[in-house]
Image: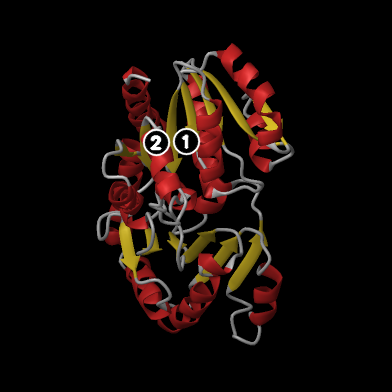
Amino acid sequence: MTIIHLEDEPWDSGLAQYALALAAEQARRGHAVQVWGLRGSPVLAQAASLNLPTRGWVNPWLELPRLRRELAALKPSILNAHTGSGHALALALAPRGAAVVRTRGDARAPKGGPLTRLLAGRTAAFIAANTVLKEQLQSAFPSARTTLVAQGIAGPASAAPLTREPVVGMLARFDAVKGHVVALDAARLLRVEIPASRLVCAGEGVLRERLAWQLKPMGLAPFVAFPGRVADKWAFMASCRVGIVPSLGSEAVSRATLEWMAAGRPVVASRVGGLPDLVEHEVTGLLVPPGDAAALAKAVGLILRDAPVAEAFAAAGRERWERLFSPAPFYEDTQRVYEEASRLPR
């Protein structure tokens, strides 16, 4: 197949990573894949680093005739739009014989207004990145073909043995929605129960410096570290006994959660967005209410104290990633949607 992914966000995001991981696997399987989006965006830069052909624009609507000619020459089977603006553009560009597929991996619920219903009626298939999004799409567009396809990611060939050190890891950008403040409050509570415990929050972002200044007043400076962006995420995860994803909202897709599972680490995550689809409660980790530092501390403490539970969660998480969230099922589930969409009359 010739597949064009339209991902026109001006920033990096979970949505972008979903599209790029899929495009890379499709190209590895022999499909002709291109990524189209905003010129100079991180999305196109990362696509190029994956050796994926790209096409950038500043304002695509001003280039519509040229884009149509370029697209018609490629004779694509599928135009996969990953944003609302990309969806409208895909429908405007699609040449005869090409099916438009809309992937929704954003946290906002779809709008069921006249315009969006019109777009939905011309769309061959919808892909939802999690159960909540699937239910929202089915409610907004009852007659649309909607399929759940969870993101898959590549992982290490094997999981490192669990460290004995009570190190709790967090891998996320420093943004309010990611729940770093909750993680710090939980670390303070956990220190009372397990004095040797440590929290290491890897990543960068606007809140990192401000929160770093608060560690000393909170009495956490010796026990909490903010190392910034880590060069080797798998080595970082191997140094942790538990991974946490204490997000307060969003998380339509969560690459970090899948990475903790692929690394063979128990996960404690908030019950928001698509996280309940990924973490199987009391099997691969534990789910807690968002914003509840006491519940987060209690769940992490349970895993740190109980070695058999930690080992069981770790092994089950790695197995669940391999079976459901590795590149193979991601590709195969998407390909089934594409093949059905390409057979529909247009």
- How has the structure been colored for display? secondary structure
Q: Which mark is residue 216?
A: none
Q: Residue at x 62, y 77 (%)?
A: 222
Helix, strand or loop status at disc 2: loop
Taking the view exactly as shown, the residue that stands out farthest to the front is: 114
Residue 263 visible? The answer is no
Residue behind mark 1: 154
CB under 8 Å between callouts 2 and 1?
Answer: yes
The quadrant of the image that shows the C terminus is: top left
* Residue at horizontal 46 percent and vertical 65 percent from the top: 247
**Looking at the image, which is closer to me, 117 or 342?**
117
Q: Residue 143 in the image: state x and y as whole percent.
A: 27, 39
Q: Quickly name the residue at label 2.
A: 326
* Residue depicted at 34% across the width and 48% down the height: 137
Image position of 207 with respect to 253: above or below: below
Q: Dot 1 lies on which element?
A: loop
Query: Can the viewer see residue 122 in this picture?
Result: yes
Amino acid type indicated by mark 1? Ala
State how far apart marks 2 and 1 are (Cα): 6 Å
**In the image, residue 315 lies at what x, y percent?**
31, 47
Residue drawn at x 35%, y 25% is 341
- From the viewer's perspective, is 5 left or right of 206? left
Q: Is residue 49 above or below residue 184?
A: above
Q: Nearer the viewer, residue 16 or 193?
A: 16
Circle 2 Cα neighbour tier, 10 Å, few/some/many (<14 / 14–19 / ≥20): many
Q: Mark 2 or mark 1: which comes first in sequence?
A: 1
- State the residue in front, 146 or 156: 146
Q: Quadrant of residue 305?
A: bottom left
Identity of the amino acid at label 2?
Answer: Ser
Residue 326 picture location, percent across and down = 39, 36
